[in-house]
């Protein structure tokens, strides 16, 4: 007696579920992929926010290779001649009567990189930096906290401070655009 067998048949590609481009991805798989992408994106976004908005200056954060690459790119584009010696800048400020503009920044800080790309290279900002202030950049890295950051209680990056020639804080801002930065300096013109 013969055993019953089920014939193997090939599904027709002309069924409504499939087209000439192939069969669609099942709905459950699509939802799973979307959920994974949302969770991954949210965790990456939260990690970057935590680095910039809740900065612990001695946290031991190390810059990522992408951040280092963007730092090198922004350094090549940054036409600002920054002083890195705050004491020397304050001495020059006393001689000229100009305030000192201090930019606390880090290569791993996305808003800092945005300022390096879009604010500092702006021609009107360049003119303001040359004519009205003495610009100082204090780089924050993952292994040390510069004394100036401690002195001025810098907790977030970027922090831009305008200080008088005696080193007293006049005004403090975070990320700002070119117009806001110029307005900050214009409110506190040099005394001489």
Image: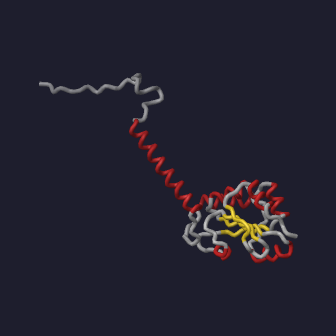
Choose top left, top right, bottom left or bottom right for residue 186: bottom right
Q: Is residue 168 left or right of residue 127?
A: left
| Quarter of the figure with residue 15 | top left
Say which residue appears at 42% left-offset and 27% top-offset.
Answer: 18
Vertical placement of 143 versus 180: above or below? below
Looking at the figure, which quarter contains the C terminus?
bottom right
Q: Position of residue 126 (x, y in %)?
A: 81, 59
Determine the residue located farthest toward the left in the rendered image.
1
Q: Quadrant of the N terminus?
A: top left
Nearer the observer, 167 or 139: 167
Q: Position of residue 86 (x, y in %)?
A: 74, 74
Depicted 180 relative to depicted 61: above or below: above
Instruction: Give the percent coordinates (x, y) of residue 138.
Output: 69, 70
Residue 64 in view: no
**Residue closest to the eye, 134 or 5:** 134
The count of marks equals: 0
At 59% from the left edge and 73% from the top edge, which residue is drawn? 143
Q: Quadrant of residue 82?
A: bottom right
Q: Position of residue 137 (x, y in %)?
A: 72, 68
Q: Residue furthest right?
A: 192
**Is 117 displayed left or right of 110 in the figure?**
right
- Is residue 35 placed above or below 90 in the rendered structure? above
Q: Residue at x 31, y 25 (%)?
A: 9
> Which residue does the image show at 53% across and 58% down from the upper left?
47
């Amino acid at each position: 007696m013969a055993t019953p067998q089920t014939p193997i048949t090939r599904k027709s590609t002309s069924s409504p579920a499939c087209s000439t481009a192939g069969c669609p991805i099942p709905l459950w798989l699509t939802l799973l992929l979307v959920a994974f992408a949302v969770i991954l994106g949210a965790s990456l976004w939260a990690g970057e926010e935590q680095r910039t908005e809740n900065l612990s200056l001695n946290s031991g954060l190390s810059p990522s290779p992408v951040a280092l690459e963007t730092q090198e790119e922004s350094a090549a584009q940054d036409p600002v001649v920054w002083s890195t010696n705050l004491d020397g800048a304050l001495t020059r400020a006393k001689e000229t009567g100009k305030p000192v503009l201090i930019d606390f920044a880090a290569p791993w800080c996305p808003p800092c990189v945005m300022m390096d790309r879009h604010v500092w290279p702006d021609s009107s900002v360049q003119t303001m930096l040359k004519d009205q202030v003495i610009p100082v950049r204090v780089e924050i890295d993952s292994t040390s906290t510069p004394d100036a950051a401690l002195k001025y209680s810098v907790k977030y990056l970027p922090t831009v401070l305008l200080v008088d020639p005696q080193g007293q804080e006049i005004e403090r801002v975070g990320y700002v655009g070119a117009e806001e930065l110029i307005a900050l300096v214009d409110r506190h013109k040099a005394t001489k």
